[in-house]
Amino acid sequence: MSWVTLALMIVAAVASIRALPGMAIYGLGSILLYLLPALLFFLPAALVTTELGTTWRGGIYGWVRQAYGDRAAFFSAWYLWLQVAMLLPVVLAFGADTLAYLIDPRLAGNGVFTACVITLLVWSITLMALRGVGALARLSSLFMLLGTLLPALLLIVLGALWLLRGQPSASPLDWHALLPHVFSHDSSVLAGHGKTHTSIWQRFDGELSGLVLIVSNFLAYAGIEINAVYARNLPNPQRDMPRSLILSVILILLIFIPPTLAIALVVPSDKISLTVGVMQAYSDFFNALGVGYLTPVMALFLIIGVLGGVLTWIAGACKEIQYVGKAGLLPPWWQQTNRHDMPANVMLLLAALVSLLSLIYVLVPDVSAAFWMLSALAAQMYLVIYLLMFMAAIRLRQSQPATPRGYTLARLPLVAGIGMLSSLLALLLGLLPPSGETFPLSSGHYMLVLASGLVLAALPPFVFSALRKAHWQQVSDEEAASYSAPLTIDTPSAHGPGRRN
């Protein structure tokens, strides 16, 4: 695997065209909403990940294991895997709505159609990921280029042409627009499934409004660490990992900011759909140029982009669980791999969970509230993972100062501390419920449901640890340790000798 390929995989995991309409509502103000989270959260995460990823194997699992031991590592890997299962139905619903836009926009309000498309996509992606790291790297890179980078670049070009042709901007372009005006705007925007969506970040009053709005965008940058598990597949991890991360950071910012402004140029903020806002922009741009027939083509490209992002998430999260199993922390069933050394059982189980969760679109009347809860819970779980990552970085700098590092971050405690505080702030503000009369839960019930979900999701690792059997570890102690070992240490092959019953 080349460092460029890994960079493209990281971009596929982090950057998503899906999230752009939600920020385009704020026009030029979206620049601030992207840059502040980038400085307070994304940059610390990228820098810390660079040191950790060029020093130890195993991604989140490996770093937390080196810092805090097996149980904490198991907890972090489990949380990552489970939050992916909870978030994928929401992400794949974007693909379903985009496909509906291509076939018949009325299908976007059909729960059966949405559930069927989610199920079809997740199983298709899982079958692709089962083909191994080599195929995964090629497919995710190709899908990212076609489905994320190309559509983003096209939006930038179309936005520039819009201005050069003297077309009016749907969003203010004066200096005052650089500060998001979230205190008195009407917060109703069009959303998928034929409903009006209340943008929760526009409904907070006073100073808290802007703070919550900025923090809400932290998780737009989540995922830069998900592909660190593949550092061991690079020819020279210490040299190549920093290159991959630097390139990915640049590409991610380019995919987020200019295309968001392009959408704001052509689609009025009160008309932007959170699910098909990108397609609205393409439609308006193409119609103005007299090439409206190209709009369905872009829908296909966006669906490809969804496939690329989900492909990297599924494979990365399941690899973490594979390492947990190899360490003897999960029963043998969880450790089964196919001939491509992919954790087949874990990946199939994840696909089954996503398929099951997609039925919410069919069975639950208030889909918006149900999936807001699911998304909020997944976000809270991810913030806990980031807290552990930043804490592990500080702990490892103190406990293993002599371990050779491919990249040594200057002032790591300060940088990681900023990341920790940002994650903690986002975690606390994430407990605030969305405002609006249509949300069915009170503040107290909302916090109780979220807190209960976080606790229940954390129980399985401790249950498995309590039931742990000696025969669960099917490989040698040396191989089990290799999945979190420093990159400077030669490790045995996962297929080599040393298995035990």
Image: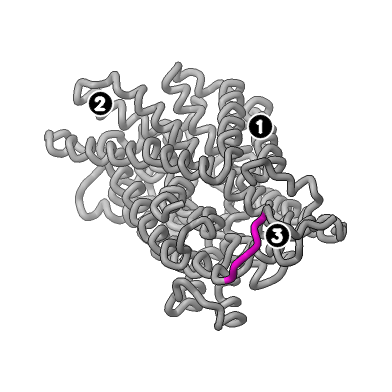
Query: Residue 15: horizontal and vertical position, in percent?
Result: 42, 47
Q: Residues within 10 Å of mark 1 (few under 14, many from 20)?
A: many
Query: Residue 461: horizontal and vertical position, in percent?
Result: 76, 57
Residue in view at x 58 percent, y 38 percent? 131
Residue at mark 3 to residue at mark 1: CA–CA distance: 24 Å
Whether 121 is drawn above or below 415: the answer is above
Magenta stretch bounds: 489-494
Is residue 492 in the magenta section?
Answer: yes
Q: Quadrant of residue 118?
A: top right
Residue at mark 1 to residue at mark 2: CA–CA distance: 35 Å
| Front disc: 1 or 2 | 1
Residue in view at x 23 percent, y 21 percent? 291
| Front disc: 3 or 2 | 3
Q: Main secondary structure of the magenta part?
A: loop
Q: Can you tell which mark lies on residue 286?
A: 2
Residue 147 shown left or right of residue 219 in the figure: left
In this figure, which residue is indicated by the disc labeled 1?
355
Residue 418 shown left or right of residue 475 in the figure: left
Query: Residue 343: horizontal and vertical position, in percent?
Result: 67, 45
